[in-house]
Amino acid sequence: MVARLVIAAPASGSGKTTVATGLMAAFARSGLTVSPHKVGPDYIDPGYHALATGRPGRNLDAYMCGPELVAPLFAHGARGCDLAVVEGVMGLYDGASGLGELASTAQVSKLLRAPVVLVVDASSQSRSVAALVHGFASWDPGVRIGGVILNKVGSDRHEALLREAMEDVGVPVLGALRRAPQVDTPSRHLGLVPVAERRPDAVDAVAAMAAQVRSGCDLEGLLALARTAPPLGAEPWDPAGGLSAADRTGLGSARRPVIAVAGGSAFTFSYAEHPELLTAAGAETVTFDPLKDEQLPPGTDGLVIGGGFPEVYAAELSANERLRKAVAELARSGAPVAAECAGLLYLARSLDGQPMCGVLDADARMSGRLTLGYREAVAVRDNSLAVAGTRLRGHEFHRTVIEPGAGADPAWGVVHPERRVEGFVQQGVHASYLHTHWAARPEVARRFAEGCAR
């Protein structure tokens, strides 16, 4: 059993990330082994969580992976830890649009049987905070709100008024935090700036979060609350177990294929389970940085390019002409290439007028429009990731457009919430805006590894 807490809030912008990351860092610095988790498809917050704990930040997404995988994935990440801290998404009861509680922080807290700590932005209110907390605590009897952390408190007098108001609610106040500019992290068009782009400053910010939480929160009370979580009763997810016996032996006597995985500051969006699945399928994964490395890793048989911010580094990516040519040559050879979102842009002919790899006859550019939301999709034709007809759920999150939006052979037919085709399939290339979580369909990793071995 792992002691665990879910850090939630009434709405976005209340301070969940600051409090969750600060708690992770404070507990880790006290000598506990802390497992960090994030509800939903967010890639950026887990980077700060990893910095705070020294462990991979992992996502718990009941839409993309299904509710049945939330507890096993949690148990996999938290194995051997003293404490797990789960940062929620949006408001506590906000989930996938039009699908009730699905993928909400509330649903995840129930699936994990974990107590919730509600982070409330207390600025501009006093007694009303009690009504707000009472409403959230009584809305769903299945959600156990075990404590409140009052954030953005203005003064000692303000704190006293808030605590007095909370006395009749029956939910203990486990912290009161003042405004602290030093813990703020810069944002841009898709949220916080990732750790990989500002590591020294991010280290200082996480240290400041830990100090703020230590000074303003009842760490002993929070740990005691976490330890009230009952046994989870879920077997940890296992990347090898996620593949059938046939899948795991599918490579036969073939050598282990080398799969290059893009990383560095421009490509920071990834799920920790993907390389674990590829390794379980018999491959060797090697990370490279398209901003710095002029060649692909030796012996590269396949390529995975996830999401990130190539639009921020378009000039630098374009200047690395040797690597762009190497990627294009690998794609022309028919080797499997899986590209999501940022990877799609990198494979295009150009991005904001800067030459890219030219694998796809398409051009990308920044736009003023945010595309955001869950998607349900089906594979249009056989490709390096899936056979035609394979259905899965994914997520889109970008402010760029690519023209055309789909090739002669599209990657996906989106069937919900709208119907359209998108992405590109050509030879071994599968390029799309859709972010997917392979733990939901482990055969994707097996199929890709097999293609690389061939």
Image: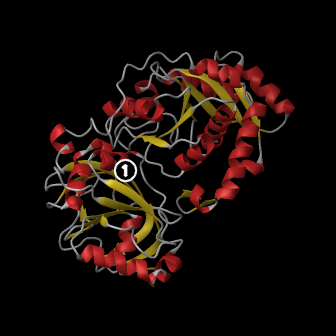
Residue 125: in sight, yes or no?
A: no
Q: Is residue 444 left or right of residue 295?
A: left
Q: Is residue 122 left or right of residue 313?
A: right
Give the x, y percent position of residue 3: 54, 22
Dot 1: element:
helix
Does residue 211 lie above or below 382 as drawn?
Answer: above
Please state which of residues 35 and 435 is positioned toward the viewer in this rendering. Answer: 35
Does residue 159 lie above or below 289 as drawn?
Answer: above
Does residue 119 lie above or below 375 as drawn?
Answer: above
Q: Quadrant of residue 284?
A: bottom left
Residue 333: in sight, yes or no?
A: yes
Q: Quadrant of residue 401?
A: bottom left
Please state which of residues 302 and 121 is positioned toward the viewer in this rendering. Answer: 302
Please state which of residues 404 and 84 is positioned toward the viewer in this rendering. Answer: 84
Does residue 235 lie above or below 177 as drawn?
Answer: above
User: Which residue is depicted at the point 41% across and 77% down?
Assistant: 323
Q: Quadrant of the C terminus?
A: bottom left
Give the x, y percent position of residue 377: 24, 53
User: Which residue is depicted at the point 66% across and 31% down?
Assistant: 27
Colouring chosen for the image of the structure: secondary structure
Crowd class of label 1 (few under 14; some 14 to 19; many from 20; radius 10 Å): many
Q: Is residue 437 left or right of residue 249?
A: right
Query: Label 1 belongs to which residue?
Result: 275
Give the x, y percent position of residue 310: 48, 70
Give the x, y percent position of residue 347: 35, 74
Question: Disc 1 marks which amino acid?
Answer: Pro
The image shows a total of numbered marks equal to: 1
User: Which residue is depicted at the point 57% across and 36% down?
Assistant: 10
Please state which of residues 8 and 29 is positioned toward the viewer in this rendering. Answer: 29
User: Which residue is depicted at the point 62% across and 36% down?
Assistant: 24
